[in-house]
Image: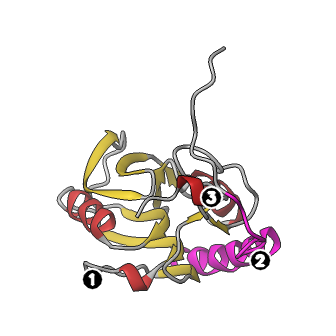
Amino acid sequence: MTNTPHTQISLPPPLISSSAIAERVSQLACSISEAYVESEPILVPILHGAFVFAADLVRAIHTPVAIDFLAIRSYIGQTSTGRIETLKDLEMDIKDRDVLIVEDIVDSGRTLSAILDMLSARQPRTLEVVTLLNKEARRKIDVAARWIGFEIADQFVVGYGLDLDDRYRNLPYIAEATMPPHQQTS
């Protein structure tokens, strides 16, 4: 087994605790259940960051749902590449279906806007968004989520599915990722 160099970060105390996340996911699930009481929406978690949020959310929704996955890459480390790459597309036909995109975080809006454009072209009946985190301070493109878990400041966060170079997804809470001084770049 070879060691792969990873970016090391120091983790301050949680910004959002696991208990606060669990409570908010339950509230979101109740609201989503009420909104889709007469339909069976297709939930579309955006991989990889939204998988933990989606797993908890779908188990808390009280109405039937279908699930399909979309894998998108738009970041390398803490830097947005400015473009999105589809790594895994949907397998289900979403035409004339209610579709709920499940996002981990909405910041600049570029990725979500591209996803909304891509899925809108497939003619769903409705297309809505639920996001765990909303970072309005970074917004470059006007996109909105119908359901928002938490508003956060302009800080890079990890945990509960969110990563830095594929690490820290397994943290049960959300924390700010702070680079040690010897790894920071100006």
Q: Quadrant of the N terminus?
A: top right
**Picture coordinates of residue 94 (x, y %)?**
32, 54
Report the magenta stretch's main SS. Answer: helix
Task: Answer above or below: position of 5 versus 170.
Answer: above
Mark 3 element type:
loop
| Labelled disc at residue 20 | 2
Q: Which residue is mark 1?
A: 142
Residue at the location (21% across, 64% down)?
117
Which of 65/134 is in front? 134
Mark 2 element type:
helix
Judge left or right: residue 109 versus residue 100: left
Badge 3 crowding class, 10 Å Cα cut-off, few under 14, some 14 to 19, many 20 or more, is: few
Q: Earlier in the sequence, mark 2 or mark 3?
A: 2
Residue 162 visible somewhere in the drawing: no
Residue 161, magenta (yes or no) = no
Residue at the location (56% across, 82% down)?
152
| Labelled disc at residue 180 | 3
**For the residues carrying marks 3 and 1, which lies nearer the camera in this image?**
3
Q: Which residues are magenta?
A: 10-39
Q: Are marks 2 and 3 in contact (CB under 8 Å)?
A: no
Residue 164 visible somewhere in the drawing: yes
